[in-house]
Image (cartoon, helix red, strand yellow):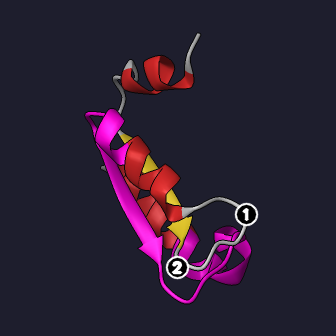
Amino acid sequence: MDTTDSSASLTHETLIVHGRDDQVIPLSNSLRLLELIDRSQLHVFGRCGHWVQIEYSIRFNSLIAEFLSE
């Protein structure tokens, strides 16, 4: 199955998290996921690399908790 097909078929609320300065995965990948997944939202952490959950652990955990509580 093509990744595009499988991503577009997601029906759940989806949170996409990305570090703006990620040198491993380009931000364009997350922007593409945002386009493909109808019920998605994207949060981009500024001045942050690939390890959002480590570099901004408190803000990341708050964001996840808020998303899950909705």
Front one among 46 and 13: 46
Q: Is residue 16 at all visible to an observer of this figure?
A: no
Which of the 4 image quadrants contains residue 22?
Answer: bottom right
Q: Quadrant of residue 25?
A: bottom right
Q: Is residue 39 visible?
A: yes
Q: What mark, if any, has residue 24 been given in the picture?
A: 1
Q: Position of residue 48 (x, y in %)?
A: 61, 82
Mark closest to the chain's N terminus, 2 or 1 = 1
Residue 55 part of the magenta segment? yes
Q: Which residue carries the number 2 mark?
A: 59
Answer with left or right where residue 1 lies relative to residue 38: right
Magenta part of the protein: which range?
A: 34-60
Q: Amino acid at mark 1?
A: Val
Q: SS of the residue at dot 2?
A: helix
Q: What residue appears at the point 30 percent right and 42 percent down from the top-left corner?
A: 35
Q: What residue lies at 30% left-to-right and 49% top-to-bottom?
A: 70
The type of residue carrying mark 2 is: Arg
- Whole-percent x, y for residue 34 in the image: 35, 46
